[in-house]
Amino acid sequence: MNRAGTAVGVLLWEVARWFWSGSGSSWIIGLALLAVSMIRPENDLLRVLKGEPRLGGELRHVDTRGYYEELIDAGGLSRRDPAPDAPPPEWVPFGASGIIEPVPTYLRWRMKPNLDMTWNGVSFKTNSRGYRTPEVSLKKAEGVYRIVVFGSSNTMGHGVGDDDAYPRILERWLNGLEGLDRRVEVVNLAVSGESPSRRLTRMLAEGERYEPDWILCDATALDPSLEELHLQAIVRSEPPIAIPFEYVSAALERAGVSTADSPRQFESKIRGEAEALLKGAYEGWRDFSVRAGIPMTVVIIPRADEKRDNPVIHKIMRNSFRHLGLDCLDAHDAFDPLSVDQFRVSPWDKHPSVLGHRAIFEALRDALLACGTLPGLRLPD
C-alpha cells in the first residue's frame, strides 16, 4: 500500500473504532469496509474490521531473524541480543560451513559440488551438480519413475545425515514396495535458505532438465520470514542483483523499501506484503507446472523451531493452492505427537531431527497410501 493508501486506511480504522464504540451506525462501518477493500483487497486492516485474525500479528510468531542470520548468512544482516539457547562454540552455521559459495544471481549462493565432509557431526555429501542427492543423469533411464523435490533447509536435511532426510526415506520406502513396476528416483534439489521466490527461480532453471514424472515443493509457516530476509539482502546487494519476477518488484515498490532502511524498518515495511509475496510464488509454481506439463504437489511441512500453530498462514496456503488448482499434501501437523526436543535437532539447530524427518515421511506415506497412486504410477495394493 502506498503512503496515501496507508493514511486513508488508518483514518478509516479510527472511524470504524469510533462507530463501533456506539456513536454511529452500522451502515457507515460497512462503508468503511468497502473503502478499505477498494484500497487493497483482503489486507490486514480489512481482516481486523471483519473480526478475522491478522497475518501481521501471526508473523510476529514466525520471525526467525537472528536464527536464520546465523544459520544461513555468516555475515548477518543485523545483530540482536544473543539467544539463551545459543549454540556451543564448535557448532558451525551453514554460511560458515564451507558448503556454499556465493553467486551473483537472485539465488545468492549454491552448494559446492562433490562434497564429502562431516558438518556438525553428520555426513554431508553433494553430487557433481551441488545437490544433496545421489548422482543421477539428467536424462532419465528406462523403467525409472523420477520425483524432483524443491525446498529449503527442512527438506535439504539440515542437521541430519545424508540418508535421514525425508526425501531419502520416501525413496527407500517406494522402492521397497512389492509389485511396483518401476524403480523410483527421488532427486532432492532443496537448498538451505530457499525462500518461495528462490524455489521458483530454481524450479524454472532445473525443473524440466531432470525429466521428472512428479514434482514436490515444500511450503512452511516460516516461508514469509525466509522471503523477508532474502529480499532484504537483495535490496542491499552491491552490485545490484536483478529481480526476475514482476510480483516481487511490485511488492517492494508498494512497500517503499530502500537501501537506507535498517533491518527493523525493512521488516516493518515489507511485512504488509507477505501474503502477496506468498501468492505470487504459488502462482509461479502453478504456471511452471502447467507450462511444463509436469504434475506438481505442494507439501506443507511443520515448522521445527517451536511447537506453535499458524492458522492464518496455513489458511492462506490451503486457500491459495485450492484456488490455483495445485495439489497439496498437508503434513503441517506431523509433529503433533512429539515434543519439541524430539522433533528438532537441538535448541540451537531448530530443524527436524531424524525422528522429525521420519514423522514427515510417515505423514506423506499415509497420504499416498490413502490416495493409492502417484501421478502416472499406481501403488500396489
Image: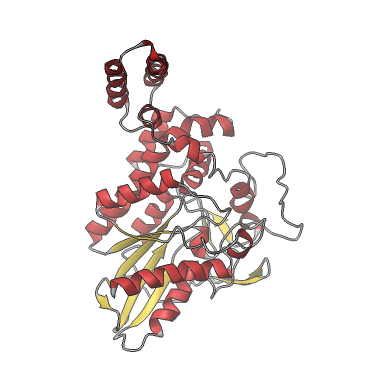
373 horizontally vs 244: left or right:
left
Residue 133, horizontal then vertical, whole percent? 48, 72
Q: Is residue 347 above or below residue 22?
A: below
340 horizontally vs 38: left or right:
right
Name of the residue lying farthest toward the top? 23
Residue 217, horizontal then vertical, whole percent? 38, 60
Q: Is residue 10 above or below residue 310?
A: above
The reply to whether residue 259 is visible in this rendering is no
Report the residue at 27% width, 77% height from top: 377
Which image quarter holds the N terminus? top left
Name the colour scheme: secondary structure
Residue 318, horizontal then vertical, whole percent? 34, 51
Which image quarter holds the C terminus? bottom left
Name of the residue lying farthest toward the bottom? 178
The reply to whether residue 148 is visible in this rendering is yes
223 or 242: nearer the viewer: 223
Q: Is residue 290 above or below residue 312?
A: below
Residue 35 location, quadrant: top left
Report the residue at 64% width, 50% height from top: 70
Residue 224, horizontal then vertical, whole percent? 46, 44
Report the residue at 56% width, 57% height from top: 101
231 or 1: nearer the viewer: 1
